[in-house]
Image (cartoon, rainbow, N blue to C red):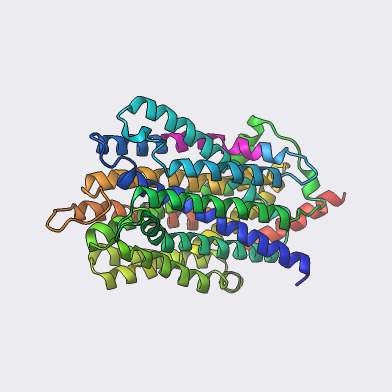
């Protein structure tokens, strides 16, 4: 492999590592901080937890409406560094600064009892975080079709990126509790000081990785990419709605993503209040990491031999077995078995969906006559943000409904384990079945069909 290609692969992979460290921290561990420490000692603790989790859901659901517009802004950007790098750097650095604030008590405001003032300050701060993260998120994943038009190269790039993502996500899962305990400086306890230190570390990792990606990648120019035109707001939504394959895939994936994050976001509650040992939560990251380093590199091989449709189908069937194991078992061995079947195949689903969304750039260009890279690729992070928003709300809802607030298990206390399992395992399993049905019935954009579309586009633009 040429030196330039290797540099691009490694820098993009490292960028994905920092990107997912950030994503998992804000989607999972931030709400864990809110329910356990942000309002600890406040006379209105449950009410404030419900307020913050509700605000996060509303803000993220409202703001995602603007993601296609953000994609349009990125598509229309013209600088000496390309269209993606400026947003990657600015968005990465600003969102890194804001996550530090999120893992604090807002300079004591969270515990003063001034609920309205806190709600206003928190809302403004979270909107700033989410807006800059959106620019960075969309710019990062939209780079794939700009870096290559070949299926094989895209799959390699996506696989390396997903490998970096897996290390980042599972690394954060493994290290979050040890880091918070270490910096809390209290025996086997997660405190506010530890969560704040964790937020600072996450900010540094994401900020540095964004700079490395901007330094090490280079957009390719081609006849097909040069056909892109400026789009206004209405054009953006028209282009998305006319891309039927993108829409059906998006519906399938959002059901899958909500199901998956509803489970993974609440797994810490399973370890803390069902098993009774929060320290064992690191097992989640260990299982996911081992599974990722085995399966992610195998994706191009599996996709070439069996096709993405069969790879995705087999992965979801495995995850359904994992849900069954979680539902019937409460022990550590059963939990580990459930994790193996549930979390390990996730990478195969993600990569199958990511590659199909990437291919829908050319499908949309072939069908509508307009090429929208960032607008099209914005759909994947948009869908994950919807799922992330729901995961924040689900975590707070389940924690309160099952009586699982606080940071540690209290012996003799009765917890709503049945309630927890319904929302964390049974409902998500049903959503995952619906997701698979929609995908198999409606999504027809295979690798072979994409190759035919690219060939047709090349012939069209030769004329």
The foreground one among 129 and 197 is 197
Name which residue lies at 18% across and 55% down.
410
Tell me if residue 65 is in the magenta stretch: yes
Magenta region, residue range: 57-72
The residue under the point 47% across, 40% down is 101
Residue 271, percent across and down? 28, 61
Residue 106 horizontal/vertical position (percent):
41, 36
Query: Could one spot residue 27 in this view of the protein?
Result: yes
Q: Is residue 231 magenta?
A: no
Give the percent coordinates (x, y) of residue 440: 49, 58
Residue under the image location 73 percent in, 42 percent down:
369
Q: How many marks?
A: 0
Q: Is residue 120 above or below residue 271?
A: above
Picture coordinates of residue 313, whole percent (x, y): 47, 64
Q: Residue furthest right?
A: 463
* Rendered-image quadrant of the N terminus: bottom right
- Whether residue 84 appears in this view of the structure is no
Identify the main secondary structure in magenta: helix
Considering depth in this image, is 109 or 86 the residue closer to the camera? 109
Residue in the foreground of this view, choosing between 29 and 372:
29
Q: Is residue 85 left or right of residue 241?
A: right
Compare residues 99 and 80 and report the one nearer the observer.
Answer: 99
């Amino acid at each position: 492999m040429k030196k330039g290609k290797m540099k691009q692969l490694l820098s993009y992979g490292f960028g994905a590592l920092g990107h997912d460290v950030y994503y998992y921290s804000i989607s999972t561990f931030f709400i864990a901080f809110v329910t356990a420490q942000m309002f600890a000692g406040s006379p209105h603790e449950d009410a404030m937890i419900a307020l913050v989790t509700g605000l996060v859901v509303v803000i993220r659901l409202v703001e995602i409406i603007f993601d296609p517009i953000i994609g349009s802004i990125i598509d229309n950007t013209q600088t000496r560094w390309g269209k993606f790098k400026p947003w990657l750097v600015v968005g990465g650095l600003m969102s890194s600064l804001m996550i530090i604030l999120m893992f604090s008590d807002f300079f004591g405001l969270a515990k003063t009892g001034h609920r309205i003032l806190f709600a206003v300050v928190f809302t403004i701060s979270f909107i700033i975080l989410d807006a800059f993260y959106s620019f960075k998120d969309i710019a990062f994943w939209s780079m794939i079709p700009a870096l290559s038009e070949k299926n094989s190269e895209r799959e390699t790039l996506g696989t390396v990126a997903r490998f970096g993502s897996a290390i980042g996500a599972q690394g954060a899962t493994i290290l979050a509790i040890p880091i918070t305990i270490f910096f809390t400086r209290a025996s086997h306890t997660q405190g506010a000081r530890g969560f704040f230190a964790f937020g600072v570390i996450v900010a540094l990792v994401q900020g540095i990785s964004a700079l490395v990606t901007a330094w090490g990648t280079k957009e390719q120019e081609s006849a097909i990419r040069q056909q892109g035109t400026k789009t206004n707001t209405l054009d953006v939504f028209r282009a998305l709605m006319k891309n039927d394959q993108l829409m059906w895939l998006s519906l399938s994936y959002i059901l899958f993503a909500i199901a998956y994050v509803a489970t993974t976001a609440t797994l810490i509650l399973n370890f803390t209040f069902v098993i009774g040992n929060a320290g064992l939560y690191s097992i989640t990251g260990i299982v996911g990491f081992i599974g990722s380093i085995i399966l992610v590199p195998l994706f191009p091989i599996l996709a070439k031999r069996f096709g993405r449709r069969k790879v995705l189908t087999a992965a979801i069937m495995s995850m359904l077995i994992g849900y069954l194991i979680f539902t019937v078992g409460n022990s550590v061995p059963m939990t580990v078995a459930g994790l193996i079947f549930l979390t390990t195949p996730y990478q195969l689903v993600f990569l199958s969906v990511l590659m199909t969304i990437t291919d829908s750039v050319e499908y949309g260009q072939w069908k509508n006559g307009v090429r929208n890279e960032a607008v099209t690729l914005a759909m994947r992070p948009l869908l994950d943000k919807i799922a992330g928003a729901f995961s924040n709300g689900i975590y707070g809802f389940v924690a309160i409904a099952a009586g699982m607030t606080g940071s540690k298990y209290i012996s003799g206390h009765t917890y709503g384990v049945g309630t927890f399992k319904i929302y964390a395992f049974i409902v998500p399993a049903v959503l995952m079945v619906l997701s698979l049905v929609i995908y198999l019935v409606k999504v027809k954009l295979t690798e072979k069909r994409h190759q035919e579309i690219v060939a047709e586009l090349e012939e069209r633009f030769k004329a």
